[in-house]
Image (tube, rainbow, N blue to C red):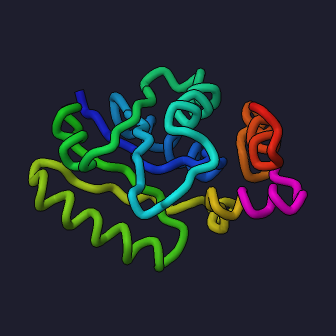
Amino acid sequence: MKIAVCPGSFDPVTLGHLDVISRASKLFDKVIVVVMTNPSKSSSTFTVEERVKLIEKCIPDMENVEVDSYSGLLAEYAKMKGAVAIVKGLRALSDFEYEFQQSLINRQLNPDMDTLFLSAKHENMFLSSSLVRNVCSLGGDISGMVPKEIEQEIINRINGKEV
């Protein structure tokens, strides 16, 4: 069984994230979407547990996809799960530079694993979780940026209402 890990902070998950997850699910027997804790980000809009649940609400039809969380090294997590690849989405050249560095260190830590880069669809090239948070906090329409299943939860949280 070919297993891939699709890591990210997903705070919140966007349509761009779901596109990459969906496309990866067609390439691998099993895809594990792993919500990672990013030590360089001091605060989060949603807890790790909430992000896991939000993603799960968006993927009920993706039978070979599961969601998990982890706070250690991605290379170690992938090895524990028997993954052969890490799948990352790329929006721009600047993404590639950062992700390429990450892929090199992950390969050094786990030589049996490769990183697969999937280019974002043109309609998602501008999307990021931080952009969604900014637009939403200023009252903008995020309906074309996030899954409809969780749109209201995102709006409520960002605007200070309970989820």
Where on the picture, by quarter, is residue 124? bottom right
Q: Is residue 7 left or right of residue 74?
A: right
* Residue 135 locus on image (x, y percent): 80, 62
Residue depicted at x 38% and y 34%: 31
Residue depicted at x 11% and y 48%: 112
Q: Is residue 117 left or right of residue 147?
A: left
* Residue 80 locus on image (x, y percent): 18, 33
* Residue 22 locus on image (x, y percent): 52, 39
Question: In this orientation, which residue lies closer to the viewer: 29 or 11?
Answer: 11
What segment carries the magenta color? 133-142
Q: Is residue 108 left or right of residue 19?
A: left
Q: Is residue 6 left or right of residue 159?
A: left
State yes or no: residue 135 in magenta. yes
* Residue 97 locus on image (x, y percent): 37, 77
Asked if 96 appears above or below 56 in the picture, the reply is below
Q: Which quadrant does the C terminus fall into?
A: top right
Residue depicted at x 90% and y 57%: 139
